[in-house]
């Protein structure tokens, strides 16, 4: 008879650390839903439509994905015999939350109104376009899943974790900081509580989880400020709650299929975000492995793809992705219960309907500090898990992300209605030097996640004296540039072909942008040729071990 302990005795899937991890992952996802609705509202999109049709399907993707990762953690624990396995977290993809809304859903809604559609009809058209984008994204991820294990074996850890650090610093940490310091008293208080308890490991009284403590204390301060006249703080006024919304079920009638002609123009914008989440999923798997949990990359991306597909078929408009915060949640002491709790709360919030309350009453500056912590933890882990000699490769991966950060506010300014009405845009700037710098930053920031990976990979190969490998990486970067996968000069990182007949329409790169794209690609190709020749001279040595 086997003396192997039962799984329930061996794997402590619920630990006190799961409470902190739960509030971190749950609030992260709730913050994502709040961000989605808020960004849409900025375009005049009806909030009740978003809450009743878009939020439930989006939340359902989180529910299914996190439940799947909860079960996969048990399988890993059973296979390895370890009791400290931390489940892979899943949630809404932050880059595509910004990208899909700012470049697809918002513009398509405004376009619908310009076509003479009523607000509700324009919202319905936009919803159908969003469904198409998410369904196609899920299919792309499903097709790429079998290749991800090979990618992880080939790309060095500096390439995978370097691009992860870039995402962590810019999207996960810095952008939420703007919301936090927009209300500096409660925001800074929440940030200090989160960082002191989770980074400094200083316990709160009664061992209250840091994220919960920040929510209670800073949230209380926020509402006290609402009572004080002249502070600029106002009490929230929630929309009427629609319990058990049924509008999202219309997606299963497949009326959105007829909107393909409307959606096809936006697919080149959506697909780079899908590809980026595949790269991010590979990064996440590598990050989890560095923290001690070796998940199968194909399974992780497969779960991500299926969750995204289900969300799309159910009316969701934001794709799901493995979260890059696994090391942070493991550092909190989380195991698997935190993903179960997140799945149930986020899923029920969208499907039952009480997300409307969360959207109204949970102040963003109070919950966003958890994003800052996760970003800092990921950045630190990216360096700690990378061989010391490759630190420069991790650092260079952050440069394209800094370009994205530098263009974030100018991009929004040029898209503001006041400037658009005056015909002011990047091309009309009087200072030619400023205009050229901004155009360069646009191209550097476009597809920055993949650019970060490729640059870090190439530099790591150079550090290892494998110049021919570095040349092949730069050759790949040049090919991607020719089709806008990276360095696209078009709005929304849109893909294109460099040449083609007029009958192909807007998929062909315009003549004004073509010279710069070709020069970018030529830069990669010539650099690749130089490195290949250099490596052929015999100066290249075999790849060194991490210890070297």
Image (cartoon, rainbow, N blue to C red):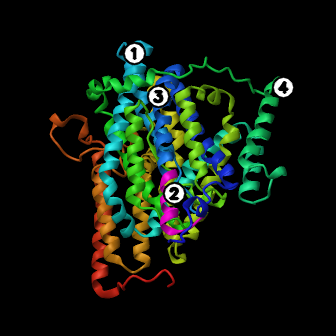
What is the quadrant of residue 356 in the picture? Answer: top right
Residue at mark 1: 121
Comparing labels 4 and 3, the label whose residue is closer to the camera: 3
Q: Give the residue displayed 40% in from the left and 31% down from the top.
A: 314
Lower position in the chain sequence, tag 3 or tag 2: 3
For the magenta stretch, what is the residue range? 70-83
Comparing labels 1 and 2, the label whose residue is closer to the camera: 2
Residue at mark 4: 228
Other-residue count near label 4 (Cα within 10 Å), few / some / many at <14 / 14–19 / ≥20: few
Other-residue count near label 1 (Cα within 10 Å), few / some / many at <14 / 14–19 / ≥20: some
Comparing labels 3 and 2, the label whose residue is closer to the camera: 2
Residue at mark 2: 73
Lower position in the chain sequence, tag 4 or tag 3: 3
Q: Compared with residue 86, is residue 321 higher up or lower down, i.e. above or below?
A: above
Comparing labels 4 and 2, the label whose residue is closer to the camera: 2
Q: Position of residue 304 (x, y in %)?
A: 42, 48
Comparing labels 1 and 3, the label whose residue is closer to the camera: 3
Lower position in the chain sequence, tag 1 or tag 2: 2
Mark 1 and mark 3 residues within 8 Å of each other at the beta carbon: no
Which of 436/350 is in front? 350
Mark 4 and mark 3 residues within 8 Å of each other at the beta carbon: no
Residue at mark 3: 54
What is the quadrant of residue 108 in the picture? Answer: top left
- Kindly state the secondary structure of the residue where label 1 is placed: helix
Comparing labels 4 and 1, the label whose residue is closer to the camera: 1
Left or right, 88 with respect to 451, comes to right
Lower position in the chain sequence, tag 4 or tag 2: 2
Q: Position of residue 218 (x, y in %)?
A: 77, 39
Which of 71/474 is in front? 71
Q: Position of residue 344 (x, y in %)?
A: 57, 39
């Amino acid at each position: 008879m086997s003396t192997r302990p039962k799984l329930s005795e061996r794997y402590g899937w619920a630990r006190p650390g799961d409470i902190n991890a739960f509030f971190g992952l749950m609030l992260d996802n709730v913050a994502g839903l709040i961000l989605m609705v808020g960004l849409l509202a900025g375009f005049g999109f009806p909030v009740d439509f978003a809450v009743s049709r878009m939020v439930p399907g989006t939340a359902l993707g989180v529910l299914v994905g996190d439940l799947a990762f909860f079960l996969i953690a048990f399988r890993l624990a059973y296979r390895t015999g370890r009791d400290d396995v931390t489940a892979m977290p899943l949630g809404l993809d932050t880059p595509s939350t910004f990208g899909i809304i700012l470049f697809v859903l918002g513009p398509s809604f405004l376009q619908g109104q310009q076509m003479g559609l009523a607000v509700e009809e324009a919202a319905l058209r936009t919803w159908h376009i969003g469904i198409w984008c998410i369904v196609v994204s899920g299919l792309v991820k499903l097709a790429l899943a079998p290749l991800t294990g090979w990618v992880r074996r080939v790309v060095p850890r500096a390439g995978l974790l370097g691009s992860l650090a870039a995402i962590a610093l810019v999207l996960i940490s810095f952008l939420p900081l703007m919301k936090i310091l927009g209300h500096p008293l409660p925001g800074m208080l929440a940030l200090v509580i989160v960082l002191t308890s989770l980074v400094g490991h200083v316990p709160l009284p009664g061992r209250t989880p840091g994220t919960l403590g920040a929510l209670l204390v800073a949230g209380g301060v926020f509402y006290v400020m609402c009572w004080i006249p002249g502070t600029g703080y106002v009490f929230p006024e929630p929309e009427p709650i629609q319990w058990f919304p049924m509008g999202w079920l219309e997606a299963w009638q497949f009326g959105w299929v007829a909107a393909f002609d409307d959606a096809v123009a936006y697919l080149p914008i959506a697909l780079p975000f899908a590809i980026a989440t595949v790269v991010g999923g590979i990064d996440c798997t590598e990050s989890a492995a560095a923290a001690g949990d070796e998940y199968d990359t194909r399974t992780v991306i497969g779960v991500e793809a299926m969750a995204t597909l289900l969300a799309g078929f159910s009316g969701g408009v934001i794709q799901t992705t493995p979260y890059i915060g696994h090391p942070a949640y493991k550092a909190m002491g989380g195991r698997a219960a935190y993903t179960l709790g997140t799945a149930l709360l986020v899923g029920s919030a969208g499907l039952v309907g009480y997300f409307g309350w969360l959207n109204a009453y949970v102040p963003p500056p109070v919950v966003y500090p958890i994003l800052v912590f996760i970003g800092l933890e990921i950045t630190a882990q990216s360096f700690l898990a990378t061989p010391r000699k490759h630190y420069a490769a991790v650092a260079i991966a952050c440069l394209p992300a800094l370009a994205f950060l530098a263009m974030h506010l100018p991009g929004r300014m040029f898209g503001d209605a006041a400037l658009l009405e005056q015909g002011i845009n990047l091309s009309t700037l009087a200072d030619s030097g400023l205009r050229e710098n901004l155009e360069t930053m646009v191209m550097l920031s476009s597809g920055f996640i993949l650019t970060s990976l490729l640059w870090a990979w190439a530099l790591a190969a150079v550090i290892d004296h494998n110049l021919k490998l570095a040349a092949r990486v730069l050759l790949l970067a040049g090919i991607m540039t020719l089709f806008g996968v990276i360095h696209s000069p078009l709005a929304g990182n849109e893909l294109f072909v460099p040449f083609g007949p007029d009958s192909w329409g807007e998929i062909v790169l315009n003549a004004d942008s073509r010279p710069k794209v070709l020069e970018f690609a030529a830069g990669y190709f010539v650099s690749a040729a130089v490195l290949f020749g250099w490596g052929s001279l015999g100066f290249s040595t075999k790849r060194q071990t991490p210890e070297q």
